[in-house]
Amino acid sequence: MRRSLSVLMLGSVVAISAVAFAAKDDKAKESPGAKAISEYDKTIVDAHKAFAAGVAGGALDDAVAGYRKAIGLDPNRPEGHLYLGGALYQKGDYAAAEEALTSAQNRAKSGGAYANYLGKAMFLIATVKEVQGKADEAKTAWKAYEDFAKANPDKTYPEGSGDAPPMLLKVYPGSAVERQNKIETYAKSVTEYAKVKEAILKRQKELGIEPSIPKK
């Protein structure tokens, strides 16, 4: 469930970015005086295509390599790190995904222009920590995302933004609250189960029964 949600979010980012970059490139080809997209952006678009193909075919090595190539071209921009983190997450390499997403978050904090990438990095970092079973860290990360979402409400495209406008800033404060509550509920259920298990084993010993707990 958490993987599906995060891949859906990453897929949306990839799709929006690819469309925007492609529209910009097409416009440049139609207008000789217009500036074409950069090598960095082209590398990102190629990696996006590899990501889409990899999700369908179950092999994301080309996407990972593509995003790493983009990072090599400009390590200070957050996009490559964000997308790399998403691809690694989809591969199940959670530790590496968390590292890449943290890099994206740190770079996106450098300016308001990267608020969109910052929000998505924070969302995915919280998800990765949760999947890894880092309950306390996940709760902290979700709270940070919740605060970000409240401070950065959804924005619409600016008037006159043209054929390839910047990405919309979309936030999901409700998801952050929901995940924090679910983590709390799960932690309580684990604690309660441990207490019940201890009581059963104690009673079995009192009755002279070989201590055992049926598997779920």
Image: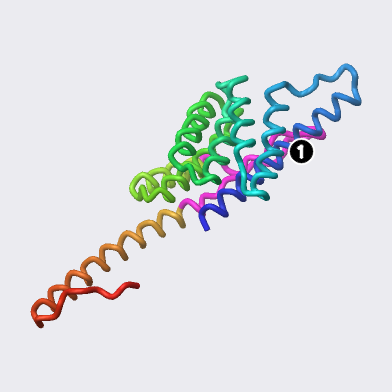
Type of secondary structure dominating the magenta stretch: loop
Residue type for callout 1: Val
> Residue 159 colored magenta?
yes
Name which residue lies at 52% across and 58% down. 1
The location of residue 18, given as percent across then percent down, is: 73, 37
Q: How many marks?
A: 1
Judging from the image, what secondary structure is the residue with disc 1 in?
A: helix
> Residue 70 colored magenta?
no
Looking at the rendering, the stretch of residues picked out in magenta corresponds to 151-176
- Give the class, few, some or many, for how many residues have Cα within 10 Å of label 1's Cα (few <14, many ≥20): some
Residue 160 visible (yes or no): no
Q: Foreground: 37 or 179?
A: 37
| Coloring basis for residues | rainbow
Which residue bears the numbered disc 1? 19
The location of residue 109, given as percent across then percent down, is: 51, 28
The location of residue 194, given as percent across then percent down, is: 23, 66
Q: Foreground: 54 or 121?
A: 54
Residue 47 against residue 212 in the figure, above or below: above
